[in-house]
């Protein structure tokens, strides 16, 4: 009998990280510089482990290769998505990611990285770096070489509940005081353009990757934003943020008991607010803020009950 696959996240220390993942989500982490929670991951740099049911103890990448029936017939070589929660306690480096074609050739067959962000929370007057002002590659190179960051980089004000689609080739950075649920292609390739000349605990600058960054940056910047579509149901509201060749991402607002049925497609779930439960085949699974799970292909009917907000995605 199929069960939801509840996942144990992996945490990553970052120089820009903080304590929001402990404080907001109750995860047991010792580091006060925790930047990333790899919540639903089959990436070799930090695969999540199944917590419950017949596959307990297996990593998601092993489950993907050993039990393809859970993920349907349109199976790709690697699990295509990676869900993270990011605590930007300080600014992240200004960066850009390659597309699939470039990463395949230059990064040992890695996937490219198109990503998207749901702003869970942020400080007042928070912003992000999103796009640039160069009209040609020459202009981009000139601004980078001269360190004219204020002229080059576009800043966009953000508030909780905002959503940003960040295609590969987009120059971007999360900035100080931002808590984000990120859905991305399963890739760990980042080209750093500018790191604010920061040094780590050992006094070292982090590597920059200027040449590759210039090669992959889309010039001029293209804005890939659509307005979200909201649908009201009894006891639920579904917001569609993006439906693209890489992923579709939704927010489900649950207010009470709601029935669903999914058979054809596996879905990824991250509870970002409130709590509730999932009822399936007479079994009840508690869902708290920070619970992440996948429902496999053939899961069928289930109910969600409670007051919670869930980010749902699929390829
Ligand atoms: Zn990024």
Image (tube, rainbow, N blue to C red):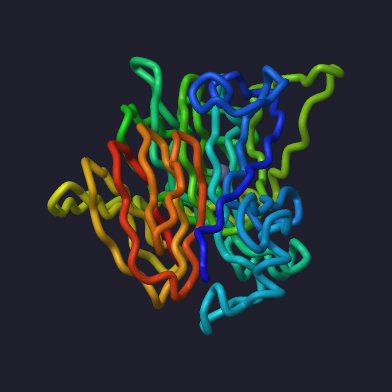
Front-lying residue, 192 or 9: 9
Query: Looking at the image, is 302 positioned above or below residue 276?
Result: below
Query: Looking at the image, is 46 positioned above or below residue 200?
Result: below
Front-lying residue, 154 or 78: 78
Query: Looking at the image, is 287 positioned above or below residue 87?
Result: below
Residue 124, by quadrant, is top left
Residue at screen point 58% across, 35% down: 94
**Is any part of residue 133 visible from this angle?**
no
Q: Position of residue 120 (x, y in %)?
A: 39, 32
Residue at screen point 29% across, 48% down: 252
In screen coordinates, is 229 left or right of 241? left
**Is any part of residue 288 visible from this angle?**
yes
Query: Looking at the image, is 48 positioned above or below residue 149?
Result: below
Residue 156, by quadrant, is top left
Front-lying residue, 171 or 167: 167
In screen coordinates, is 63 left or right of 237? right
In screen coordinates, is 189 left or right of 21? right
Tell me which image quadrant ligand 1 sits in. top right
Front-lying residue, 149 or 39: 39
How many badges with numbers are in the image? 0
Q: Position of residue 313 (x, y in %)?
A: 42, 57
Q: Position of residue 21 (x, y in %)?
A: 56, 26
Residue at screen point 72% across, 21% down: 30
């Amino acid at each position: 009998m199929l069960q939801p696959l509840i996942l144990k996240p992996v945490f990553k220390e970052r120089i820009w990280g903080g304590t929001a993942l402990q404080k907001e989500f109750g995860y047991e982490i010792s580091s006060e510089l925790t930047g990333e929670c790899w919540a639903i991951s089959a990436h070799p740099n930090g695969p999540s482990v199944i917590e419950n049911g017949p596959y307990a103890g297996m990593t998601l990448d092993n489950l993907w290769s050993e039990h393809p029936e859970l993920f349907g017939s349109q199976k790709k070589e690697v699990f295509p998505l990676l869900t993270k929660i990011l605590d930007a306690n300080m600014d992240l480096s200004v960066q850009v990611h390659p597309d699939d074609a470039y990463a395949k050739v230059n990064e040992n067959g890695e996937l490219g990285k198109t990503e998207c962000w749901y702003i869970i929370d942020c400080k007042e007057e928070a912003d992000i770096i999103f796009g640039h002002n160069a009209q040609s590659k020459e202009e981009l190179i000139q601004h980078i070489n001269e360190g004219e960051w204020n002229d080059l980089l576009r800043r966009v004000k953000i508030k909780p509940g905002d959503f940003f689609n960040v295609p590969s080739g987009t120059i971007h950075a999360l900035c100080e005081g931002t808590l984000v649920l990120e859905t991305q292609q399963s890739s760990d390739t980042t080209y750093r353009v500018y790191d604010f000349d920061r040094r780590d605990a050992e006094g070292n600058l982090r590597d920059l990757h200027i040449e590759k960054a210039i090669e992959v940056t889309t010039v001029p910047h293209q804005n890939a934003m659509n307005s979200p579509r909201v649908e009201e149901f009894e006891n639920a509201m579904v917001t569609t943020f993006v439906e693209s060749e890489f992923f579709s991402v939704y927010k489900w607002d649950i207010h009470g008991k709601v029935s669903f049925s999914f058979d054809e497609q596996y879905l990824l779930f991250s509870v970002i607010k409130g709590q509730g439960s999932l009822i399936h085949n007479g079994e009840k699974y508690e869902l708290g803020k920070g619970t992440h799970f996948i429902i496999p292909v053939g899961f069928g009917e289930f109910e969600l009950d409670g007051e919670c907000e869930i980010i749902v995605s699929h390829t």
